[in-house]
């Protein structure tokens, strides 16, 4: 008689999986979360505005601010809460609640309902594991993350692969177990995140662009905060508003998920969105805010005979969000090329 194996649980590595970055940037997320409520109270207390105006401002800028803050909070809570637990016949996962990520929720699936597994499924910008099952005549999938820095977890996934490969062999009866395992699965835990990428160059370039996108958010926001800090009376408060405004406009750049179309939308509507947002957040039009490089930088550039650029805050933000949307579009196109390449190799 075989004894049942005890439950095995696995989590992200907080430092190796770089969730510490979200912990450091958490204050930004909390500020964004507070924006809707601060804005609503401020507009309601402002004199000379119609009664509907505070709620219009709340929806137009407050809701995007909350969603942007949600990204920071959810990403941190994902690293803290996420835990995958295996038993002989069951898999469960603990995740942050989508609506309010400070609350954890647990989901599970009976492995007897699963009929196939994809350990290299696309999940946003990540690779994840999908367990497929049928409900109401439709194929559905159960998501569990891929813990790349946990060899024991890789072995657990390999065991599931072998288990469902056996089921395939029983159904088709035409191929040997070794042939199917050799073609579909890797038993080396160090290869679990790379063996199914048909083009390492495409995957590496997409990862590089995604890292540049994260860095660009902070660069754009930091420069916008510096420019706004020069608005009289200057100081920390206008810099905070400028930082927040840039974060919200980076969210607008998500229209780059539609390559070409997104850039056209920003080209025709981007300046209007920027001037409207600046009017609500910093109280003046971004067209009236001019900027110049700090004198120390100007001297360095002048020594190399480089012309010092300057312009309005609208110009800076417009070209920044346009460029950021192009990075998003490149990431989308590379992801599509990678999936197409993997599909062709699978065929």
Image (cartoon, rainbow, N blue to C red):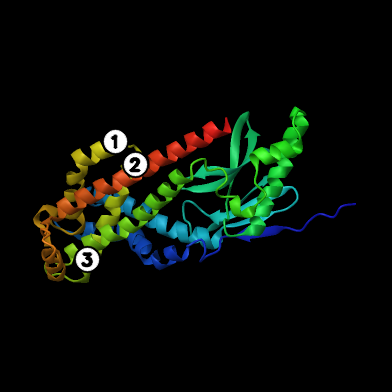
The reply to whether the C-beta atoms of the residues labelled 2 and 1 are less than 8 Å apart is: yes
Where 337 falls versus 295 (above or below)?
Answer: above
Q: Give the spatial CA distance, label 3 vs label 1.
A: 32 Å
In this view, the residue in front, 42 or 318, is 318
Quarter of the image with the C terminus is top right
Mark closer to the observer (3, 1): 1
* Quadrant of residue 113 within the rendered picture: top right
The span from disc 2 to disc 3 (Cα, nearest Å) is 29 Å
C-alpha separation, residue under disc 2 versus residue under disc 1: 8 Å
Q: Secondary structure at mark 2?
A: helix
Badge 3 or badge 1: first in the primary sequence: 3
| Drawn side of residue 70 relative to residue 302, left or right | right
Relative to the observer, which residue lies in front, 197 or 146? 197
Q: Residues within 10 Å of mark 2 (few under 14, many from 20)?
A: many
Residue 121 image point, x, y percent: 55, 42
Total labels drawn:
3
Name the residue carrying label 2: 329
* Relative image position of residue 83 (x, y in whole percent): 60, 58
Res. 45 in view: yes
Identify the residue position indicated by label 1 in the image: 260
Please state the horizontal and vertical placement of residue 105, each as a whole percent of the image: 57, 54
Q: Residues within 10 Å of mark 3 (few under 14, many from 20)?
A: many
* Disc sitting over residue 95 in the figure: none
Q: Which label's residue is closer to the chain start, 2 or 1? A: 1
Q: Who is closer to the viewer here, 126 or 341?
A: 341
Task: Please give the name of the residue rendered at 70% of the width and 37% of the height, measured from the top-left corner.
Answer: 180
N-term mark: 2 or 3: 3
Is any part of residue 116 visible from this angle? no
Q: Are marks 2 and 3 in contact (CB under 8 Å)?
A: no
| CB contact under 8 Å: marks 3 and 1 | no
Judging by the rendered image, the residue that carries numbered circle 3 is 239
Q: Is residue 206 left or right of residue 55?
A: right
């Amino acid at each position: 008689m075989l004894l049942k194996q005890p439950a095995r649980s696995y989590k992200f590595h907080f430092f190796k999986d770089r969730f510490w970055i979200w912990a450091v940037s958490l204050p930004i997320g909390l500020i964004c979360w507070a924006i809707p409520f601060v804005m609503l109270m401020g507009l309601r207390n402002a004199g000379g505005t119609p009664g509907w105006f505070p709620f219009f401002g709340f929806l137009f800028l407050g809701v995007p601010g909350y969603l942007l803050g949600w990204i920071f909070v959810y990403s941190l809570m994902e690293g803290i809460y996420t835990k995958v637990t295996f038993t002989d016949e069951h898999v469960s996962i603990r995740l942050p609640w989508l609506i309010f990520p400070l609350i954890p929720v647990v989901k599970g699936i009976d492995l007897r309902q699963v009929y196939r597994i994809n350990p290299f499924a696309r999940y946003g910008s990540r690779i994840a594991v999908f367990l497929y099952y049928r409900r109401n005549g439709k194929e559905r999938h159960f998501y569990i993350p891929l813990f790349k820095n946990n060899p024991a977890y890789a072995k657990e996934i390999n065991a599931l692969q072998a288990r469902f490969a056996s089921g395939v062999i029983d159904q088709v009866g035409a191929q040997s177990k070794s042939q199917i395992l050799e073609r579909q699965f890797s038993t080396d835990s160090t290869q679990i995140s790379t063996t199914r990428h048909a083009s390492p160059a495409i995957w590496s370039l997409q990862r590089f662009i995604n890292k540049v996108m994260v860095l660009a958010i902070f660069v754009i926001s930091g420069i916008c905060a510096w420019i706004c800090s020069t608005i009289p009376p200057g100081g920390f408060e206008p810099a905070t508003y400028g930082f927040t405004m840039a974060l919200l406009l980076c969210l607008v750049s998500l229209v780059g998920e539609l390559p070409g179309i997104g850039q056209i939308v920003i080209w025709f509507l981007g300046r209007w969105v920027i001037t409207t947002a600046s009017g609500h957040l910093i109280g003046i039009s971004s067209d009236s805010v001019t900027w110049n490089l700090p004198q120390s930088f100007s001297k360095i550039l002048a020594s190399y005979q480089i012309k010092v650029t300057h312009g309005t805050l609208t110009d800076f933000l417009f070209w920044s969000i346009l460029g950021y949307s192009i990075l998003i579009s490149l990431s989308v196109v590379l992801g599509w090329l990678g999936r197409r390449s993997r599909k062709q190799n699978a065929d």
